Amino acid sequence: MVENKISRNKLAKINKLWQLSSGVLASALMTLMFLRLPDQYSSNLFTWLLWFHLPLLMFHEFEEYILPGGFKHFFNTYTPFAKDPPQVNLPLNEKKIFIINMGVWVWIIMGALLAKTTPWIGTGAMIFQLGNVVAHLYLTQLIKPGYNPGLITTLFLLIPYVVVLTWVILTQNILSPLEWIYASIVGFGNIALMINEGKK
């Protein structure tokens, strides 16, 4: 019990570190990417957009956990996944916060690195992001309608991103029908995993 509390406190500190730094990292990455926009637009906009996913996600996480923050409390209290009565560390705890968010960082980076050979990986991350959009626009509104931590970046960053990336993929015929299937399996499969974790 004591060991679990210690490890939870350590994870909370680690989470706070990357959550605080995510705003600065996102700003730096976005600045660098916009400086390269003309070259990337003419050569490979799809790859550029896959990299662009990372700072957008970082801004989203910054809103969820830092400014104004409170996503963990909101999720564990005002969503259909909340326990009855609500609990501080269930179903969303520090371990899940770290694994989910860092896992998506790695996924996005891999998708961007492999954009030219396996474009469905990065597209799968975009499809997964749709689950995030639905969560902030629908699931979080069922019990406590109104603002929830992450809603602003969902509306003004993530939704436009998903629309633009989908348009680029379709107009440039980047994915074959089979690759769309792969992307859907990976994206929706991870959404299903998140829903299952939310029920525990």
Image (spheres, rainbow, N blue to C red):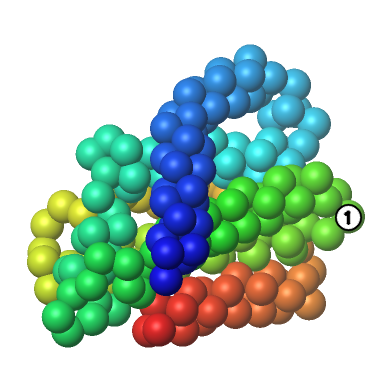
Q: Quadrant of the N terminus?
A: bottom left
Residue at 66%, 45% (x, y): give it.
50
Residue annotated with mark 1: 117
On screen, residue 64 versus residue 187, left or right, reads: left
The image shows residue 9 at horizontal and vertical percentages of 42, 51
> Which residue sits furthest top?
35
Whether residue 42 is visible, yes or no, is yes
Whether residue 97 is visible, yes or no, is no
Q: Nearer the viewer, residue 75 or 153?
A: 75
Above/below status of 37 relative to 174: above
On screen, residue 178 versus residue 85, left or right, reads: right
Above/below status of 43 relative to 172: above
Above/below status of 47 relative to 179: above
Residue at 66%, 73% (x, y): give it.
186
Amino acid beneath label 1: Thr
The image shows residue 159 at horizontal and vertical percentages of 40, 51
The image shows residue 154 at horizontal and vertical percentages of 35, 50
